[in-house]
Image (tube, rainbow, N blue to C red):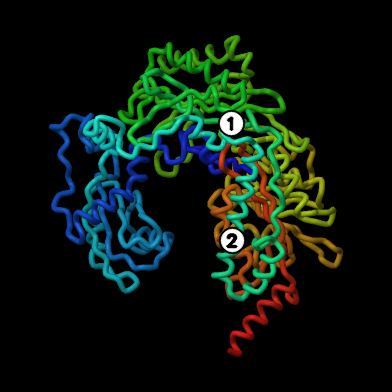
């Protein structure tokens, strides 16, 4: 799928990278992340211990206890935490939407919420955190007794969640062994869960998983759109139980050393040795070890050389590595990007400055450059060095400050003969050779011609649109990230592509404007085709509505890096006409899976949807089905 040029949150996997990034699924950088993850467990404890009675005291005494043994010491030791000002709200209605709840709290009631912790959709109780006691008291006063959807809410102070790391250590001490239920796995099992299988067996497993996803899609259609049941049954008979045809999975041309970007954690292994590698534990599990990546199959040799070089530097440095437990230390993250086309390596060193003076910061930067530009650094291909200041972000801040220290400001890679520049915080397909396969599949499914205009929704840096450009009349791309659009424009100019235009803004608001801009003339056999390449969560329903209501848009290619999450979008594309979805429904025709991430469970899925004419087979089937129901 098209990778988006949006700011990267340090220490967290991007949408497309998922768990094959620097940590296993569910691993957290620090205490606040872990506290949020453990909210379900904490909620269960609250429900069991308090029922509907209010806690008598939300304060926790910490001053007389050993911080290493006190599960609440973080409240005093880590500066501000909204856990200090948390409330519990009970009595919520059985059915409510998360966005609906947020609108009630933040818009209608004008509460100054800092975090809203929802156990699961439809949960009868939630936790809400605030930034100060005054805001907390105001919220309790407003919410306690408030009637919403016929239900009277109750609100009261909630105790802070305990530190999960300290809790696990206490459990281990009591049991004289490992923390209870610890999910300790090897670095290979964390980062490359399928590496133990021959590649052909990996492909078979992923093909089977995509069949399961499409079967789930068919079941969702069956239950959500009764009018389509006869059509779905007919499709299942023709496609081995699936709602559309699924072709054989396309393998990655490169199975080993394919990753062009990794975010490595800097920490300590189980013996206390400083390491640059991948996290194999998590804060909530009670262990934070970082292990070597030397034996991992999916990391290229130039990255391993760069990591080994910087690990040696960290081990000899007088500065300590960062600790997620104490919030002390300096070295935290090493991001390495490389180009398969040029062999260039870009390095971004992430550091907590703590109390370093300006002079000390300058010396640190100079020593980093000296390390990475040494003879071994040059052998690894290092040509660009950046310095990232990792800090607690303020509201509205999406990325950390970054400073160019040495060499090139960008590196360059190629997809389908086109050159793309890559900046330090830009997203780009993790597996460049497989990206060529993915984009070619999209082109083959779409079958554009010189009378086709392409609407590239969530275009990112323009990679998909530019690859389509030579096959069509024009490409109109839109993305909400302004920097991504600037990169897309640069890439178009760099490759001499003149039939692409890119626009910055929310796709929800611009789709109709772009369609008018395309100025399609059906009487001259011109057509409009949409390429959708959304983030993992899929498109907002407003974008789906705009696409459904767009006249002249009869074909759509949906590229998903998280097929499970995209099912709702697919169902909405196929729903019958309604007051909201006025345009004729699309129908899923063909699907192709592409293995973008060998040795991991993740797979991309591309689906072709075509608009069903008003007198088409599906419309007739649905109409007949509705008429039959009315007769009965």
Q: Quadrant of residue 354?
A: top left
- Disc tally is 2
Query: Which label lies toward us, 1 or 2?
Result: 2
* Side of 311 relative to 411 (left or right): left
Please give the residue where the numbered disc 2 appears in the rendered image: 217
Q: Element type at marker 1?
A: strand
Using the image as rendered, state which of residue 409 and residue 585 is in the foreground.
Answer: 585
**Given the current orientation, which residue lies at the most extreme top position?**
375
Can you say which quadrant of the picture contains the C terminus?
bottom right
Residue at x 38%, y 12% (from the top left corner): 318
Please give the residue where the numbered disc 1 appears in the rendered image: 261
Residue at x 66%, y 49% (from the top left corner): 503
Can you say which quadrant of the picture contains the N terminus?
top right
**Given the current orientation, which residue lies at the most extreme right position?**
524
Using the image as rendered, state which of residue 378 and residue 124 is in the foreground.
Answer: 124
In the image, residue 16 above or below residue 405: below
* Side of 454 relative to 542 (left or right): right
> Residue 94: in sight, yes or no?
yes
Q: Where residue 505 sits in the image (x, y, percent)? A: 60, 51
The answer to whether marks 1 and 2 mark residues whose Cβ atoms lie closer than 8 Å is no
Whichever of callouts 1 and 2 sits on the residue coming sooner in the sequence is 2
Q: Quadrant of residue 621?
A: bottom right
Q: Element type at marker 2?
A: helix
Cα distance in 3D space between marks 1 and 2: 32 Å
Residue at x 44%, y 44% (from the top left corner): 396
């Amino acid at each position: 799928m098209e990778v988006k040029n949006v700011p990267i949150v340090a220490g967290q996997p991007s949408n497309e990278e998922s768990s094959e990034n620097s940590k296993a699924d569910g691993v957290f950088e620090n205490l606040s992340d872990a506290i949020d993850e453990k909210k379900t467990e904490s909620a269960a404890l609250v429900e069991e211990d308090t029922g509907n009675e209010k806690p008598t005291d939300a304060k926790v005494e910490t001053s007389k206890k050993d911080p290493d043994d006190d599960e609440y010491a973080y409240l005093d030791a880590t500066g501000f935490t909204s856990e200090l000002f948390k409330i519990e709200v009970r009595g919520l209605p059985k059915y409510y939407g998360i966005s609906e709840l947020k609108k009630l709290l933040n818009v209608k009631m004008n509460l100054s919420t800092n975090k809203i912790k929802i156990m699961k959709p439809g949960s009868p109780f939630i936790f809400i955190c605030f930034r100060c006691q005054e805001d907390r008291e105001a919220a309790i006063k407003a919410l306690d007794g408030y009637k919403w959807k016929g239900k009277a809410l109750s609100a009261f102070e909630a105790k802070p969640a305990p530190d999960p790391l300290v809790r696990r250590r206490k459990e281990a001490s009591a049991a004289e062994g490992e923390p209870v239920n610890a999910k300790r796995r090897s670095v290979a099992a964390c980062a490359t869960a399928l590496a133990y299988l021959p590649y052909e067996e990996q492909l078979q497993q992923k093909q089977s998983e995509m069949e399961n996803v499409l079967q789930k899609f068919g079941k969702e259609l069956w239950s959500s759109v009764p009018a389509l049941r006869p059509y779905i049954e007919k499709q299942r008979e023709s496609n081995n139980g699936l709602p559309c045809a699924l072709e054989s999975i396309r393998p990655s041309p490169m199975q080993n050393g394919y990753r062009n970007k990794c975010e490595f954690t800097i920490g300590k292994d189980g013996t206390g040795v400083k390491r640059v590698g991948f996290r194999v534990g998590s804060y909530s599990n009670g262990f934070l070890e970082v292990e070597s990546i030397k034996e991992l199959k999916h990391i290229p040799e130039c990255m391993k050389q760069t990591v080994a070089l910087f690990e040696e530097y960290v081990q000899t440095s007088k500065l300590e590595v960062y600790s997620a437990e104490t919030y002390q230390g300096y070295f935290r993250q090493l991001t390495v990007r490389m180009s398969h086309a040029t062999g260039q390596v870009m390095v971004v060193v992430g550091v907590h400055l703590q109390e370093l003076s300006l002079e000390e910061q300058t010396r640190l930067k100079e020593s980093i450059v000296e390390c990475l530009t040494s003879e071994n650094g040059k052998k690894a291909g290092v040509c660009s060095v950046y310095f990232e200041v990792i800090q607690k972000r303020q509201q509205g801040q999406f990325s950390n400050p970054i400073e160019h220290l040495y060499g090139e400001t960008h590196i360059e890679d190629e997809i389908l003969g086109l050159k793309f520049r890559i900046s330090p915080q830009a997203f780009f397909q993790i597996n460049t050779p497989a990206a060529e396969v993915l984009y070619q599949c999209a082109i083959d499914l779409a079958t554009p011609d010189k009378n086709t205009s392409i609407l590239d929704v969530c275009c990112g840096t323009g990679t998909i649109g530019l690859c389509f450009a030579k096959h069509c009349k024009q490409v109109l791309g839109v993305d909400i990230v302004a920097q991504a659009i600037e990169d897309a424009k640069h890439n178009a100019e760099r490759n001499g592509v003149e039939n692409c235009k890119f626009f910055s803004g929310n796709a929800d608001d611009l789709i109709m404007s772009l369609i008018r801009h395309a100025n399609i003339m059906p009487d001259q056999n011109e057509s409009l085709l949409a390429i959708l390449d959304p983030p993992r969560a899929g498109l907002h329903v407003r974008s789906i509505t705009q696409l459904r209501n767009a006249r002249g848009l009869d074909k759509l290619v949906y590229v998903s890096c998280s097929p499970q999450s995209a099912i709702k979008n697919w169902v909405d594309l196929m729903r019958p006409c309604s007051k909201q979805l006025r345009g004729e429904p699309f129908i899923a025709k063909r699907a192709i899976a592409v293995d973008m991430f060998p040795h991991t469970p993740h797979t991309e899925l591309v689906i072709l949807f075509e608009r069903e004419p008003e007198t088409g087979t599906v419309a007739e089937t649905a109409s007949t089905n509705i008429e039959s129901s009315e007769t009965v």
